Image (tube, rainbow, N blue to C red):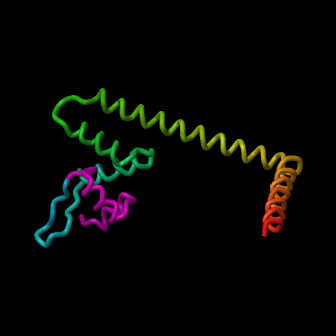
Amino acid sequence: MNIKQASELTGVSSAAIRYYEKEGLIPTIDRTDTGNRDIDERILRRIKFARQMRAAGMSIENLRRYIQLFDAQEDNTREQIELLQTQLAEMEERRDDIQAAIDHLHFKLDHYDDHMVATEEELRALERQRVESEREHD
């Protein structure tokens, strides 16, 4: 199948498929006699795998390393697991940061009248003071 068909099947843009190939995230794609990419099931599975790992937040560099380990002749299971554990820890940290931000916004909304209004008024007062101070110095 051609790259457009592969894109439709995998949900990965044609440009991203070409990028994955260039970066070594998928094997080199065979070409037809006319020079078009000829994508088979093996490449489709690799594209889907790369998409899933990117969706899990894995960097291109770490994904490339994982794939190199996977494709190597020796057993690299231990290092592959370490890469996945590192990625999981990073994603959990991001999740915790996002949850803290969500909790903070809930607090702001729940206490809008007694917290946000007062805070905003303090900020406005500070801004007025700054403007007045600039006028006095001019």
Q: Is residue 94 left or right of residue 100?
A: left
- Find out whether residue 117 is within the magenta segment: no
Quarter of the image for residue 2 reads bottom left
Q: How many marks?
A: 0
* Residue 19 image point, x, y percent: 30, 59
Most distant residue in the top direction: 78
Question: For the view shown, which residue lies furthest in the left direction?
Answer: 33
Image vertical order of residue 74 relative to residue 11, above or below: above
Q: Is residue 14 magenta?
A: yes
Q: Could you tell whether 130 is left or right of 65 in the image? A: right
Q: Residue furthest front?
A: 137
User: Mostly what secondary structure, the magenta segment?
Assistant: helix
Q: Nearer the viewer, residue 115 or 100?
A: 115
Say which quadrant the N terminus sits in.
bottom left
Position of 90 compared to 13: left or right?
Answer: right
Return the residue found at the far bottom. Answer: 34
Q: Position of residue 34 (x, y in %)?
A: 13, 73
Looking at the rendering, the stretch of residues picked out in magenta corresponds to: 1-27
Give the quadrant of residue 97.
Answer: top right
- Residue 138, how many percent across, how many down? 78, 70
* Residue at the (24%, 41%) spot, across then down: 68
Depth order, front residue of 78/133: 133
Q: Please name the residue shown 16% across and 59% down the image.
A: 30
Q: Report the residue at 22% width, 29% height from top.
A: 75
Residue at 81% x, 62% y: name it.
133
